[in-house]
Image (cartoon, rainbow, N blue to C red):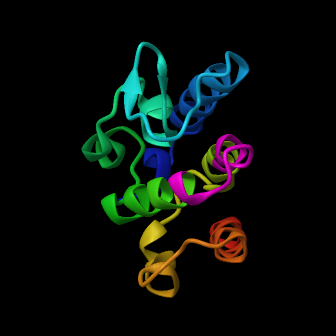
Amino acid sequence: MLAYHNDPAVKAKYIARYAEHRRLDQVVQGTGFLDGRGCFIGCTLDNYAPEHFPIELGWPSWLTNLAEIVFEGLPKNKAPQFGTDLLESVREGVDLEKVRMPFQPKLSSDSQRDNLLRLIRSL
């Protein structure tokens, strides 16, 4: 599975969608997706359906779940930016399985979040 199905248009679509939710101040913690407002997953997909990330974005399920844990665990003012940073950091066409092992056990602190973004950017 390749990130964004190796298609820059797919990446652009989801970045733009999430950015629009941010612009409208609709990215919130604690809500999957309701009345146009939601979490990282909800605002990326316009629907709280984490199982669609592999289908629509080419991201493995474990990374989607991990991203949601990080998003929900961040301070309220940092969570929306994390979603933007993560979507932008993943290059289209990379195999995201390469970052699984270093982050699988636990990812909840700011430093671990930064390490995840750094590792993804290096792919």
Left or right of 63, for residue 51: left
- Count of numbered labels shown in the rendering: 0
Question: Residue 76 placed where, x, y %?
Answer: 67, 45
Q: State the residue at coordinates (52%, 40%).
A: 29
Q: Is residue 89 or residue 30 the one in the foreground?
A: 30
Query: Can you say whether 116 is above or below 70 in the image?
Result: below
Query: Residue 62: where, in percent of width, then height?
Result: 35, 65
Q: Nearer the viewer, residue 67 or 100?
A: 67
- Quick one: 10 or 120, which is closer to the camera? 120
Is residue 19 found inside the magenta-colored segment of the image?
no
- Quadrant location of the N terminus in the rendered image: bottom left
The x and y percentages for residue 21 are 61, 22
Tell me which residue sits at (42%, 30%) in the image: 45
Q: Residue at x 47, y 67 (%)?
A: 96
Taking the view exactly as shown, the residue that stands out farthest to the left is 51
Q: Is residue 110 above or below residue 93?
A: below
Above or below, 65 against 38 in this view is below
Occupied quadrant, residue 114 = bottom right
For residue 77: magenta?
yes
Work out which quarter of the rendered image holds the C terminus and state it. bottom right
Residue 65 at x, y percent in the picture: 38, 58
Q: Residue at x 73, y 49 (%)?
A: 78
State which region is magenta. Answer: 72-82
